[in-house]
Image (spheres, grey):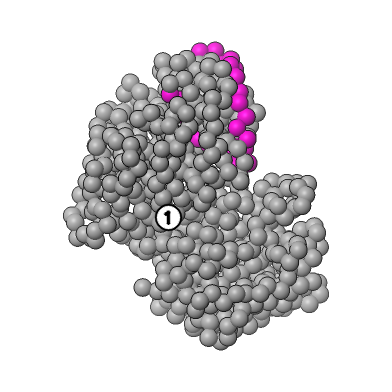
Amino acid sequence: MRRYAALLVGASDYESAGIPPLPFVATDLVRLAWVLNHRGFQVRLARSDRQVGANFINGEVRGFLRRAGRGDTLFVLLSGHGVHARGQDYLVPEDAHPEIDPFVLCCVAIDWKKELEETPAERVVICIDACREGIEQDSMAFVGVRGWATRKVDRVLRKKLAYVYACSPGQSSLFVRPEDRVQPGAECDTDPGDSFSLFSRAVCDVFAMRHDSLDLMSFREAVQDRVGELHSAYDKKGSPQQLRVITDVDPHTFALTPPQVAGWAGKIPAQPEEPCNSRTSAWPVAGSSPRISRRQALFVLTAATTGGVAYTLWPDSNISTDKKSPRILGKKLWEFTTGGSVNSSPAVEDGIAYFSSQDQYLYAVDTRTGLQKWKSPVRVGLKHSSPAVADGVVYVGSYDRNLYALDAHNGHQQWKFLADDEVESSPTVADGMVYFNSMSGIIYAIDAGTGAKRWEYDTGYGDYGFVFRPPVAEGLVYVPGGLSDGTDLYAIDARTGIARWAARVGIDPSQPALAHGSVYLGGGSDGTDLYCLDARTGQQKWIFPTGDWVDHPAVADGVACIGNELGSLYGVDARTGKQRWQVRTRHDVVGTPAVANGVVYVGMGDFSGKSGDIGDEIANVILYAMDARTGKRRWELPSGSGSLSSPTVVDGVVYASAGHSLRAVRA
């Protein structure tokens, strides 16, 4: 079935003081997402939990093009600062720094030729609301811009491809500030205090007001007219910015939108429904921390038209299509609700579950009754750090750069250690030592009893933001590190902090997992492979390709389980690297699977379409239990809106978060 899908990416909160922020971008995209969803698009509003960096933007666009179906129409909007250099257009990511020379090295080239050649979509429109020149108080320009080049668009097979620029060379893409006021007598259907980009607002209004099917030419003309109206109403300087559409096909034959959704009059609420968090919640690693990566950057937007929740079940095993298999619900034992989102995976020890919440508390809950034992107001790792428990002490990282040690019985602080940067990774406790990473990529070894530092090691991985839990075994600590052109996996002596070996595993590696004398992690030149290395030497044993960005693996009972962005979950023989089974789903795998007693427990987004985009989803995720040997589903449990942490399985009970709650489910 052909579909209409949209990807919206915005950079607004720039890290460098030398690049002005664009606070209205987020509101622009939420508003446009709301409208597109009502107009029949499946919408993916992509924003990172930390920063909309270069890797994140490239991964979002590439993944969106790859996941398209044959005959689809794709609409992409990129908003932020822009630059042009040596005939190439660039989007400035939030982690860009002007002092880098040349500056474009840290920018995103508007050029995804390989993915555009390979996508099965029939039509692709890329809108760039970043064409800037100079730096003006009411424009989204950035220093050094010379205008955008005339882009030659290649015809790829029978696909129709078009670029829509918010302005022409020599012009700026203007925006309205909150203090700007509509001129007396002007009518433009905006509210006092609104702040928006003229182009993005015009695109949104055209999709809302035009109830017919739009081709590329009528879209361009309608958006241009609306830009002119807004420009005049707010008395902007000079002539209105002139849209530029570049394509090598007849724009009159370029169908852009589906027919108007019946029953909708095009009215946009003053406050379109948006997610509870201003940024994407990142999916946690099983029993540890999540990783900020382009693989996990789905910004969940609840569709306002949805009246209820529907669930699409996957095929039962291998690649069968048994969609009529009975739906067996898991048995929930209890649910404990907090005052914020629960994104960390719980640590369970001696009948107590320890976990953090975005209400800025660390909780201890009785696993038998689901009742609170205590809570500590420590600013724990609100989105990432999951606790570790050993010898009556709970260890957890914090946004305030500290690692905290709390008494497991009452939550009282025993000591804290100040690191060089935020501590969003989850700690590992082994042989009287606590190992953890700071966001700058430094791994620390701390005395578990006193909080004294034993050693530190700089992995060189700080450009990505380090949120892994470092696994420890046989006297070695395993951590990814290196640069973006090829990342190494290091094995570091747990006692001395000296690297024993390093192995090249490709870009953007995942959380390592240890089993059977081997290290398992996602990586490869495209980030799509599962690697198995010898834990003692770092020698490669085997590589299993999946075809798309992979998440973190879990290994147990001789099976390595890993999911990818295409919605496939694999069971791979941990010793040989041979595929045992594959489940193709209409879901996005959430975090890392947990494997225990021959059962795989995994969270997945519940999408009605294959893309895993917002139009398919009702902001819900489901916890599944499936046979580790065959991939056959055993039971499922809907987990409501919001995030679902990676599960922790202890004594026949599965513990996993669901929105603001922690749930206990019979395994």
Q: Is residue 574 visible?
A: yes
> In the rendered view of the protein, which quadrant contains the N terminus?
bottom left
> In the rendered view of the protein, which quadrant contains the C terminus?
top left
Q: Is residue 236 visible?
A: no
Residue 662 in the image, given as x and y percentages of width and height: 37, 37
At 45% from the left edge and 66% from the top edge, which residue is drawn? 68
Q: Is residue 213 above or below residue 385?
A: below
At 37% from the left edge and 31% from the top edge, which residue is drawn? 515
Residue span colored magenta: 449-473
Residue 543 in the image, given as x and y percentages of width and height: 42, 44
At 50% from the left edge and 70% from the top edge, which residue is drawn? 74
Helix, strand or loop under label 1:
loop
At label 1, the amino acid type is Gly
Residue 316 position by quadrant:
bottom left
Residue 436 in the image, given as x and y percentages of width and height: 53, 27
Tell which of 519 and 390 is nearer to you: 519
558 on left or right of 242:
left
372 on left or right of 625:
right
